[in-house]
Amino acid sequence: MQSLKISEIVINWYKKNFRILPWRPKNFDQKIDPYIVFLSEFMLQQTTVKTVVPYFINFLKKYPTIEILAKAKLDDVLAIWSGLGYYRRANNLYKSAKIITNELNGVIPNNYEDLIKLPGIGDYTAAAICAIAFDKKVVVIDGNIERVASRLFELDLRGNDLKKKVRKILFLNIPGKENSLFTQGLMDIGATICKPKIINCERCPLLENCRVAFKNSAINYPLKIIKEKKIKRTGNFYCLINSKKEILFLRNINLGLFENMHVLPSDGWLKDNHNLDFNIFSIKERFDCGVIKHSFTHFDLDGKVILLKVDDNQIKLKDNCIFIKLENLDMFSIPTLYHKIVKLILKNI
DNA sequence: AACTCGGGGTC
DNA sequence: GACCCAGAGTT
């Protein structure tokens, strides 16, 4: 009797052991809504399933179709994304929804070439939507699949070289049908069995196919990429608050970090400061509230938090300035860093 | 090819 | 603390 192919093993395993996730259909016969896959893949870029789940549920409730999303306001989309991070994803998701609704008759493309043209959709996401939503025969490589493959075939490569080799090998092992299940199966094996630090070889369906199974060296795969040590940065954050307990935020027009989000005035830690002209305010009191620590991908931030109590007299604010009531903060697009700062401020009021 | 983009889970 | 996560866009 001929032994089972890798794809058959993975698909059979997946049908019995798949993770139940809010963006997955309840059974395999159910038709998949491409918008569900489209949305989940944006959220899942570089973000763990556990973190995404509550955001996905909220988002889908508010924007159940791509047309409703396309007709929403960007600020509202960013607000519901607040806390999830990598806010460029939300900006691009919104752009793509508009393009699909206004230029593509509201139909999400079912092929790699058209998908990858859309903003926020790169190689991985284009392939993932093709495979998962449309069951197309394309190779999908995410962090999970790259790790599983690097161990399965004991690949002594890293970075882009590893990805190329994985692509070549997976192309030879891709099934003729049910690639949607194969792709998600490899992901689930990576997420639940072949994990980065804890490897449960005894539960793995690919045990007999794996070159590093039960070996101490398994944990070394994929080979690590040496990373630079994180830099420290310091800055000052200013919280202007009036007697109505409204806090002054700026809508950040700078590209890059926190694009289009609401931020507090600050200086010292970015090239493009989130500047405010304090002269138009009459400041009654000033407190130093201590230091907030926040970790970014490439640096650790120590931010001095300064509370400034200001008069209520009507001032002509610039367009990008807005006083937000404390109880309304959740309605606005405010990154986690600034929620942490406000929390520190409240202890000092 | 190397940077820049968040924030939280996990160990 | 360090690593990792259903990566993409820019330089």
Image (cartoon, coloured by chain):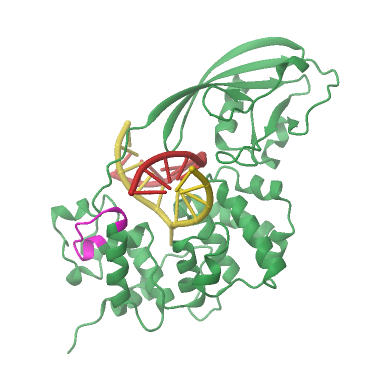
Chain colours: A green, B red, C yellow
Where, by quadrant of the figure, is residue A322 drawn?
top right
Residue A348 appears in the picture as rendered: no
Q: Is residue A280 above or below residue A272?
A: above
Residue A291 is at least partly visible in this image: yes
Instruction: Single out the residue that lies furthest toward the bottom.
Output: A1
Which quarter of the figure is the C terminus of chain A placed in?
A: top right
| Magenta region | A150-160
Quadrant, the N terminus of chain A: bottom left
Where is residue A292? Give x, y as percent: 51, 24
Residue in view at x 37 percent, y 63 percent: A141
- Taking the spot 28% from the left edge, 58% from the top edge, the residue there is A161
| Depth check, front residue: C7 or A326 | C7
> Can you tell which quarter of the image residue A35 is in?
bottom right
Say above or below: A186 vs B3.
Answer: below
Q: Residue at x 43, y 29 (%)?
A: A300
**Is A159 inside the magenta-drawn segment?**
yes
Residue name at image x 51 percent, y 25 percent: A269
Judge whether A325 appears above or below A220 on screen: above
Residue A249's spot in the image, x, y percent? 69, 30
Magenta segment: does it hold A9? no
- In the image, is A270 to the left or to the right of A314? left
Give how far across and how far down residue A25 sits, in percent. Answer: 52, 72
